[in-house]
Amino acid sequence: MVERDSGRGDSVASMVSIADVAAIAGVSRQTVSNVLNAPHRVRPDTRQRVEAAIESLGYQPNRAAQALRAQAARVIGYRIEPVRVDSLTTVQDRFLHALAEAVQAIDHHLLVFAVDPDDEISIYARLHRTGTVDAFVLDGIGEGDPRPGQVLRLGAPFAAFGRTGHDSDHLWVDIDDAAGTAAAARHLVARGHRRIGFIGWPEGSGVGDRRAAGWRTTLDKHGLLAECADLDLRGEDAVANGARLAAVLLDRPQPPTAVMAVSDTLAVGVMQAARDRGLVVGRDLAVVGFDDTPTAGVFDLSSVRQPLEAVARCIVRALLPRLPAGGSHAPAHPEEATSEPVGRLLAPTLVVRASSAAATPC
Amino acid sequence: MVERDSGRGDSVASMVSIADVAAIAGVSRQTVSNVLNAPHRVRPDTRQRVEAAIESLGYQPNRAAQALRAQAARVIGYRIEPVRVDSLTTVQDRFLHALAEAVQAIDHHLLVFAVDPDDEISIYARLHRTGTVDAFVLDGIGEGDPRPGQVLRLGAPFAAFGRTGHDSDHLWVDIDDAAGTAAAARHLVARGHRRIGFIGWPEGSGVGDRRAAGWRTTLDKHGLLAECADLDLRGEDAVANGARLAAVLLDRPQPPTAVMAVSDTLAVGVMQAARDRGLVVGRDLAVVGFDDTPTAGVFDLSSVRQPLEAVARCIVRALLPRLPAGGSHAPAHPEEATSEPVGRLLAPTLVVRASSAAATPC
């Protein structure tokens, strides 16, 4: 976008023009515009010279005036979820930060909003209708979620982290959950484990079902599924449930030597149950969680890590052609900049720590 | 703010005017304006009627045009911190949500941004200069932090969560940390404890020093300080440090019957050390943490809870008179709406759980 002279037309524009700034700094007007709109394209020393000129002249390039000319707020909206009290997962914290960085890398900003859970869509409608945001990033989209359809009907551009399953005619980026648990199961098989249990969420959660499938198909490939079929237990995401279900598995006549959990929250419960029985985690029982929360780090728990930074970049790249401010930005990570897909699956990685690093003793 | 007819003057304004919407909905123009700018003031059924009229006419009250007229973006900027890998604390997640709600309650929005740690202030300067945000909320401000002074020099309105100590001529709201640890110490004394240890951060952190002071003065008041003076140990905020320092205390000839920690992260380490020695937390050793993280809930750890929702509301109220959009909003919590102080201390509350609920056996 070429910056037009702000001294012209707008009632609140300052009397200093972009040409004055350019003259003082000894650069072109385009360079001043770049400092204002795409500072990463400008060499640091030049940027500092232009910023000093802006400062000394008191130049005020009003964003509202720019937005009105461009019909673009250069703002992406993101709903934040209430903090959950029963779970250790702090994935949203990490994703929010990654998303803010990805959005800033294309010279936009991230506006966050809390919603009334009984009337979630009306705030999306208001933010879109008033031009406060140009587009949305939807998070936590799962099986049968009505929100992508609702935002689609508003006519607002958006991309989703997660997918509804049946309705995938919107942009989405998601984690390949089954690939994550498959990697964890392969790791345990390679360490010599033959009795590998799984503690998952109740069926029907989509994400949890895919994580269970990665465990199941990997054991099947290695001819271990028949002898592990009785080691698949399910419960809601809480530490106490992890401990309770692990106790059931450890009391079996043939207990597992390794337990995978669908989340770090359940995995911490598994570690507690093992310690309560005098087992040393990592020596007597291998444990692997999912999400690589800060808790996994402090408890030395192996865990599957979601590539949230890559998810954020992919979502922003998918949105870019639909943003009114346009997309002339070179991707910082060219390997992620393939032709725009409707959906994109990114593989997580396994972080191996002491809880599963050792080979099984038998 | 009275909404002016958007069909007049702005090049991108829609051809439908606010008067058309009012006529179709059978309400005054002021009511339409309220639906757009202060929806909480409008009865739900009226709001729905106006929103239906807006929808059917395709009325577009462009926010950029409004911002240009009002010289107010109605946006507050908030810097988000990178996620820490070595700590269980997720306080920012909870504060961010509370802040978004408080900002929305005065019909503003919250814009979040990540910063380059080597050049933090230039993004504040850009956001302020371009009118992208009207004001900032600074978080995590401690002893000697240069940022309040830097943002003050930019001329941008702001309020801080935390204070620099020496420089308190800016708006700030902070937690009364000493009152939190004093409440925890009184609770333990009331449960019969006489040997109460404290595991804190190294001196000089401000927050940590104040938390230690609350423990010390309360013990002193009860004539217990002399016999507990050897039970004050310090280390960086990590679970392993909590376990290591608790082990030192528990190996003393006269070990404590209760241990307070300056954070839940250190408290979880204390619980680990107790279990490693065969002690039952809550029966053989009382433990109290600080921050009431999700981890405290899942481990049944008593903890001092920061009133982050009240902090967010107080910060927004303190900012209100300095916002260009003005402040005609009735406070939702009148007890927090006293005359505008430069600084405000809010007392945390103790959440008692199984880790400290029982009376000492001796």
Image (cartoon, coloured by chain):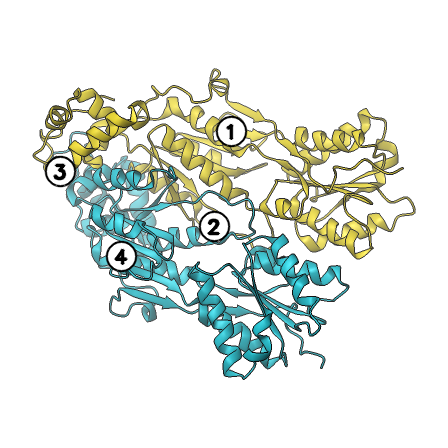
Chain colours: A cyan, B yellow
Name the image quarter holding residue B38. top left
Q: Residue furthest top?
A: B339
Please report the residue visible at 41 percent of the width from the left and 34 percent of the height from the top. B101
Alpha carbons under labels 4 and 1: distance apart = 36 Å
Q: Kindly identify which residue carries mark 2.
A: A93
Please report the residue visible at 64 percent of the width from the left and 45 percent of the height from the top. B296
The one nearer the camera, A301 or B278, is B278
Above or below, A351 relative to B268: below
Mark 4 belongs to which amino acid? Leu
The one nearer the camera, A121 or B323, is A121
Could you tell me which secondary element the residue under label 1 belongs to?
A: helix
Q: Kindly identify which residue carries mark 1.
A: B310
Q: Kindly identify which residue carries mark 4.
A: A319
Q: Residue furthest right?
A: B253
| Same chain check for tags 1 and 3 | yes
Mark earlier in primary sequence (1, 3): 3
Mark 3 belongs to which amino acid? Gly
Alpha carbons under labels 1 and 2: distance apart = 21 Å
Q: Is residue B312 left or right of residue B123?
A: right
Whether label 2 touches label 3, CB < 8 Å: no
Q: Position of residue A193 (x, y in %)?
A: 63, 78
The one nearer the camera, A234 or B192, is A234
Could you tell me which secondary element the residue under label 4 belongs to?
A: helix
Packing grade of label 1 (10 A; few <14, some 14-19, many >=20) is some
Please report the residue visible at 83 percent of the width from the left and 41 percent of the height from the top. B257
Could you tell me which secondary element the residue under label 3 belongs to?
A: loop
Q: Chain of mark 2?
A: A
Of badges 1 and 3, the one in the foreground is 3
Name the image quarter holding residue A8. top left
> Which circle marks residue B58 in the picture?
3
